[in-house]
Image (cartoon, rainbow, N blue to C red):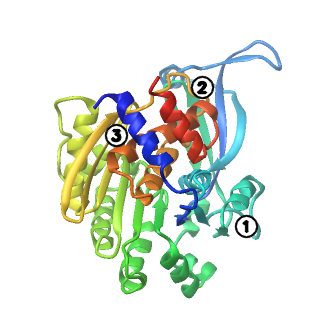
Amino acid sequence: MDHRQLCAQAADALAAVPADHRPQVMVGFDGFIDHIIAVVDKRASATSYSAMATIAEFGGRVIDAAGKSANFELVVKQSKIGGNGPIMANALCGYGHRVTAIGLLGEGAIDAVFAPLAARAEEAISLGAAASTDALEFSDGKLMLGKLLPMDAVTYATLVAKLGAERLRTVLKRSAGIATVNWTMTLGMTEIWERLAAEVLPGLRGDRPLFFVDLADPAKRTIEDQRRGLETLTTLQRQVDVVLGMNEMELRQVLTALGVSWQEGGSDFEQARKGCEIVRDRLGVSYAMCHLVKSAAVAWNRGGTKASACADGFFEPKPKITTGAGDHFNAGFLAALLAGLAPLHAIQIGGATSGFYVRNAASPTRAEVVGFLRGATT
């Protein structure tokens, strides 16, 4: 299908969603304060500098320093809400969803960085002090330098201690969408999934909520840990409809953990589509989605009917911001599925949500995503 035609169809589908469609969504459980940083190349004065443009340029300087030493000046351009959970939760608030945000949002009280999210969300529940990330941004990507010690507090025991077992059950019972993200940095996430699957979800509700998962670059976790986490998604699928969201690198890593090679041949998104089909079938999940730099793919199983799709996206060569782009894709994709839209339209809506965000450095409303999609048809 022609890209402009697909954008027009996705825009019409999203515009037709009733204004009072505001499903409950729970998002957890991380929380970071992101410092968006430029690495100085040359400084002309106290107020003027040029930044290193690419990761390759920065990497070359690092390599040149081997056996010697080097000094890199970092300029904090912005300190903002961070963590896959809070960013995704904030983006879903933009869609008008009733969000319960659970995560590392502040010790004792909600940290000021997360105050806007707490004001937009229906409920914000903190599990403790936030972690932090220094995000070195370049034109061709970003390097995320995380300080993760607070993430050790994200465990099933902490969830129960902070919320209480009955309140946790209430939140999960009322939520049409449940998003548990940043598996890689949340060492207690697999146990959380296992305990939910064994102790909380069975018999909790008569329907099957969407259970969104973002692994968040699992390369640094062992293959054994990856396989245990993936096997737990298969177990969760008995109670919920698992939606596994990945970027290209994450899809490659999941395939490796499953003992499968990347599917060579065809365009990038065709290769991703084939990979998503394999992940869907091997894990038995309802949806396997992959967002690439310039496109996206999805494979699904709805009521026993399997299909897949892929499409071009909305690449921006000079983004205002890149940190959080994937979380916005995930939010738009999940919002579209919660509205009952076709998976092909959902990846376009996810791409448009991310596309608006990287161009404007702000989370879009549903109407703004519709406008972005319609703008892509001209």
Kind of residue sitting beneath label 3: Glu
Q: Residue at x 51, y 19 (%)?
A: 57
Pointer 1 or 2: first along the chain: 2
Residue 309, position in %: x, y?
Answer: 26, 43
Horizontal arrangement in the rendering, residue 227 relative to residue 158 (left or right): left
The kind of secondary structure element at disc 1 is loop
Kind of residue sitting beneath label 1: Glu
Q: Are marks 3 and 2 in contact (CB under 8 Å)?
A: no
* Residue carrying label 2: 69
- Label number found at residue 187: none
- Label number found at residue 107: 1
Pointer 1 or 3: first along the chain: 1
Residue 232, position in %: x, y?
Answer: 31, 69
Disc 3 from disc 2: Cα separation? 35 Å
The kind of secondary structure element at disc 3 is helix
* Residue carrying label 3: 248
Q: Residue at x 61, y 80 (%)?
A: 163
